Image: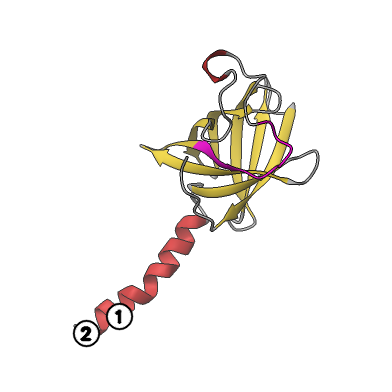
Amino acid sequence: MSTLSRPFLFCLLLPLQALARDQTDIAGVWRSIDDQTGQPAALVQIDANHGVYSGKVVRVLDPKAPPLCTLCSGERHNQPILGMTILTGLKHVGDAFSGGEVLDPDSGMTYRAQARLVDAGARLAVHGYIGLSLFGRSQLWERTAITPARP
């Protein structure tokens, strides 16, 4: 292979590497879908820090959503939902992500969390529960290419 063709080949393979990473990594922007109404609720930016994932609300999509987390307790009480970290502590274990917590701003409740990529990485199944994972509720979040400005 000539010296000139190597950089060209490398440039062709870069998009394939990014696509493969997107199918196994949950970092990025996700459109959360309300499991009760089926409507988009928010955009959540998930980032990794030393292999631990957390997610922050970067845009509220539901026009009826309250701007403050009035039902939250502690330091989150009456804080803006926009900019709030609602997903913490997820770690990649096998083909899933677990060990974290997810906050439901509508109820103010914090649940243990698990997540799994589905549909070749296009959607994220987020499951919140108390006690046994058998009991709880799930949402499907959709990966989006939107890169909103951070609050």
Query: Residue at coordinates 80% horizontally, 42% vertically from top-left?
Result: 37
Q: Is 20 in the magenta?
A: no
Local crowd size for mark 2, using a 10 Å CA cut-off: few (<14), some (14–19), many (≥20) = few
Residue beneath disc 2? 4
Query: Residue at coordinates 33% horizontally, 74% vertically from top-left?
Result: 11
Q: Residue furthest right?
A: 37
Residue beneath disc 1? 8
| Coordinates of residue 73 in the picture (x, y in percent) | 60, 14
| Coordinates of residue 77 in the picture (x, y in percent) | 59, 17
Local crowd size for mark 1, using a 10 Å CA cut-off: few (<14), some (14–19), many (≥20) = few
Q: Is residue 136 left or right of residue 151?
A: right
Front residue of this view, candidates 39 and 129? 39
Q: Quadrant of the N terminus?
A: bottom left
Amino acid identity at mark 1: Phe
| Coordinates of residue 19 in the picture (x, y in percent) | 48, 63
Query: Residue at coordinates 21% horizontally, 86% vertically from top-left?
Result: 2
Q: Secondary structure at mark 2?
A: loop
Amino acid identity at mark 2: Leu
Marks 1 and 2, Cα distance to the nearest angstrom? 7 Å
Give the magenta part as a residue range. 55-66
Q: Is 61 in the magenta?
A: yes
| Coordinates of residue 21 in the picture (x, y in percent) | 45, 57
Residues at discs 1 and 2 in contact (Cβ within 8 Å): yes
Front residue of this view, candidates 146 and 101? 146
